[in-house]
Amino acid sequence: MSSKDKTRENIQTGIPVVVVLGHIDHGKSSILEAIKKDFEITKKEAGGITQHIGTYEVEFEDKKITFIDTPGHEAFSEMRSRGARVADIAILVVAADEGVKPQTKEAIKAIKKANIPMIVALNKIDKEGANPQRVKIELQKEGVFVEGLGGDVPVVETSAKTGQGIEDLLSTVVLVWQISEIKKDIQKPAEGVVVESYLDSRQGPTATLLLEKGRLKKGDVIKTQTTFGKIKKLQDFQLKEKKEIFPGQAGVVTGFEEVPEIGERFTLVDSIESARQEITSRERYSKRLMERREGIEKFLKIILKADVKGSLEVLEKILGGLIQDKIGIKILRSGLGEITDSDVRLAEDEKAVIIGFRVKMSPIAESLAQQKQIKFFIFQVIYDVIDKVRKLMEEKKEKKKIRKDIGEIKTLIIFKTQKRGERSYRQIIGGKVINGEIKKANLEIKRKEKILPGGKIMEIQEQKRRIEKARTGQEIGILYEGKTKIKEGDILIVFEYAES
């Protein structure tokens, strides 16, 4: 066999890797579920907990296709920003009855930036009001020129609900892959990207690795930017043990020293010792969020807890960058481990929601959250976090804040004053409730006939006992934080904002 023939044998077309993107509620997840259902793909459960592998593989017309169960265009773009190819083909899902929406446009940008072939799935074609022609024209305005309107982007009409067009969609994927010029050399050193990672209570740090080139085998020593390890166990997407995987396939790997970050690239190294020497310092993302970004009128406040640092950093970066209809995100606290009663109290004080990613909530925290009616959500999959946060932002956009005065305190004595920064004070104040009901809320200061900016009541006490509320006639002490120093004789007007 000549050297040319050997080279040709090494370079194979491999397996196409497909990512599915689109607007919330247009059916991304439903299409993926319809494909799984048609090919009888189920997730294996361990200890009663469904593990999210992040990819799955189907065989269609004697050809294999790998689908990335991606967390939407934001995480797709985040993976790409770290140098990962991630996918070979993108399916853009657009609801035939709704057309192009804001996240459709963002997904289009992500696909174009990735410079990969696109297939449009016009989903919900069975719904009343479906208008494929209108959607095609809207796509044209976004630079997506589909077949039938002078372009070459394939369009498939689908219904995830009835199964219509699902096989046509897979046929189109195979066709697009066959005419693409993407080749994958199996003889090159193994290289790819982390598409999912978590800490397994039994097996330790675990990750789903998508192989771009080469062969990945049990026993290989691999490293990412933040960690390394020797592959102790290699499984496919159904958690069946494998000896090796090939380009375009995904493998679930255990043996890492720590949980790698989603989106990191991995490569092979000769030994654990050399991996330890080569490993670079962990990339750290800034937690400073731009609270004065132009055009933002409101913030959705979030307390974020995750199981591992890698997941926390990816979520901080993705959520911190979300802006939707003049609504931004403010992450008040982020950390690792279970959600505690301290998180719930902060959420109550700041009118925030609690987001947990692959963590539990302490029984005390859960009871307190239910008692205080604090919204909390726990997720296993990143795209579920993003979708839920976007929906919460939509809800916030529709609500208006209305100020409601709830009570007044006459300042009788100042026990302690502490200056914090140039124009910030922390004071312990004694006073009498002269009107209404007092609780932890906002306050402003009435001094003679002037109204001065105030701050917040952080704590209320009566006879050195912490209380939640005080009513007319009660003498109380309050812990105050704010911009103006309170003086004896000031009237403190306490108010809160209600959303209509």
Image: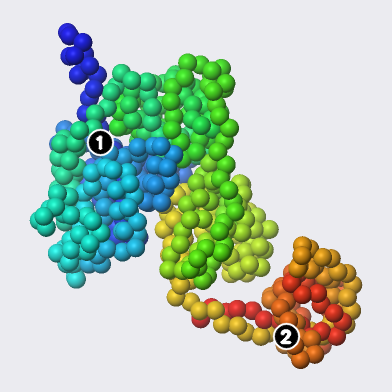
Q: In the rendering, at what x and y percent does residue 347 appear?
A: 62, 64
Tag shown at residue 451:
2
Query: On screen, 481 above or below 450?
Result: above
Query: Which one is in front, 180 or 171?
Result: 180
Q: In the rendering, at what x and y percent does residue 321 appear?
A: 48, 56
Which quadrant of the structure image shows residue 237?
top left
Q: Residue at x 62, y 84 (%)?
A: 404
Q: In the rendering, at what x and y percent does residue 17 appear?
A: 28, 38
| Residue carrying label 1 | 16
Residue found at the very far bottom of the displayed protein:
449
Q: Quadrant of the N terminus?
A: top left
Q: Is residue 60 left or right of residue 205?
A: left
Task: Report how far apart the C-alphas of labels 2 and 1 lie in the structure.
Answer: 66 Å
Does any portion of residue 146 appear in the rendered image?
A: yes
Does any portion of residue 46 appear in the rendered image?
A: no
Q: Residue at x 66, y 68 (%)?
A: 349
Which quadrant of the structure image shows residue 217?
top left
Q: In the rendering, at what x and y percent does residue 459 appear?
A: 76, 70
Q: Amino acid at mark 2?
A: Ile
Q: Residue at x 30, y 28 (%)?
A: 247
Q: Which color scheme is applied?
A: rainbow
Q: Secondary structure at mark 2?
A: strand
Q: Residue at x 41, y 51 (%)?
A: 74
Q: Secondary structure at mark 1?
A: loop
Q: Count the marks.
A: 2
Which sits earlier in the primary sequence, circle 2 or circle 1?
A: 1
Q: Amino acid at mark 1?
A: Pro
Judge the density around disc 2: few (<14), some (14-19), many (≥20) Cα neighbours within 10 Å.
few
